[in-house]
């Protein structure tokens, strides 16, 4: 598994623990230079992450990153043919902005590939991806949906959440060969696992018991929450890359050092099956 750098924080104020001010281009460039120097080769971005996708090509000029971007959610009012055209236009726009560094495109909403419309859209994009030599897949929240799409659409790449509390990614492609490239995001559960326990519970009250157990585990392991979270992520099987975002250079340095030094630790006892705890989309209602 390799470490990949997410870019959402470079284009948006993001996550419960994120900073409230965006970094200037010179700071982002310095971060990218250090990440590349330390062995990071994959960046993750999207057109919906503010304007960072449009700036990223120039920001990593001379740095041979492979960039994963997204096709935004398809408008619901488009018929099959128009949806396919819309998705193709989005793909071509990302290609234009990122050039040959673009190596994969994910449908930002996995549900867009369901049904007849999804089949039409996927067929059109598959032909385009083959011509452009770009991997195609989905970003999703539901591992079972992503697995079913692999079986029906034959995805080349997929991105799913995975962390100490949400360990579903560990078995999503069990028994499937060949295994597509699987990227993990939300290693820190949008920063929830790194917050003091009281602050974390205020954000996701339904996760109270799971967060209490998490903090007890960290204390027992005698590690920081950052290192504990990365240790658990490293233990997941069949994951090609772990996508992590940072807010500044100091966080990047800490992250790179921790990733190099921590050992993989399986902690299945921490897995939580309550979606109100592990799906950030449900926190406001928990």
Image (tube, rainbow, N blue to C red):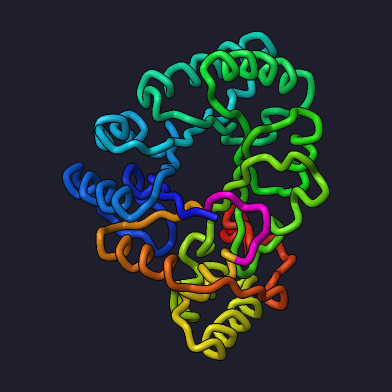
Q: Is residue 140 magenta?
A: no
Q: Residue furthest left?
A: 26
The residue at the point 36 percent across, 60 percent down is 18
The residue at the point 62 percent across, 46 percent down is 182
- Relative to 284, say whether 108 is above or below: above
Give the left or right position of residue 93, taking residue 119 as reference. left
The residue at the point 60 percent across, 44 percent down is 159
- Relative to 103, say whether 197 is above or below: below
Q: Position of residue 165 (x, y in %)?
A: 64, 68
In front of the other: 76 or 93: 93
Q: Position of residue 254 (x, y in %)?
A: 33, 68
- Relative to 32, say whether 63 is above or below: above
Q: Which residues are magenta?
A: 235-241
Q: Is residue 236 magenta?
A: yes
**In what quadrant of the picture does the C terminus appear?**
bottom right
Q: Quadrant of residue 255?
A: bottom left
Q: Position of residue 283 (x, y in %)?
A: 58, 61
């Amino acid at each position: 598994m390799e470490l990949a750098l997410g870019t959402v924080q470079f284009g948006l104020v993001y996550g419960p623990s994120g900073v409230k001010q965006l970094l200037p281009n010179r700071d982002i460039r310095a971060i990218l230079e250090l990440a590349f120097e330390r062995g990071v080769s994959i960046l993750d971005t999207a057109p919906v992450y503010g304007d960072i996708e449009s700036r990223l090509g120039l920001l990593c000029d001379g740095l041979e990153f492979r960039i994963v971007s997204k096709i935004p959610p398809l408008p619901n009012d488009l018929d099959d043919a128009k949806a396919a055209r819309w998705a193709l236009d989005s793909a071509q726009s990302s290609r234009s902005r990122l050039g040959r560094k673009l190596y994969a495109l994910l449908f930002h909403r996995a549900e867009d590939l369901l049904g007849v419309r999804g089949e039409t859209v996927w067929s059109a994009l598959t032909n385009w991806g083959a011509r452009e030599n770009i991997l195609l897949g989905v970003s999703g929240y539901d591992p079972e949906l992503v697995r079913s799409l692999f079986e029906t659409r034959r995805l080349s790449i997929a991105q799913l959440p995975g962390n100490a509390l949400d360990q579903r990614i560990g078995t999503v492609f069990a028994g499937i060969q060949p295994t597509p490239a699987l990227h993990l995001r939300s290693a820190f559960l949008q920063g929830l696992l790194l917050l003091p326990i009281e602050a974390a519970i205020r954000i996701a009250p339904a996760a109270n018991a799971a967060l209490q157990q998490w903090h007890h585990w960290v204390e027992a392991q005698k590690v920081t929450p950052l290192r504990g979270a990365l240790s658990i992520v490293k233990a997941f099987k069949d994951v090609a890359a772990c996508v992590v975002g940072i807010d500044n250079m100091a966080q990047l340095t800490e992250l790179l050092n921790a990733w190099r030094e921590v050992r993989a630790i399986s902690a299945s006892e921490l897995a939580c099956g309550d979606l109100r705890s592990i799906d950030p989309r449900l926190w406001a209602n928990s």
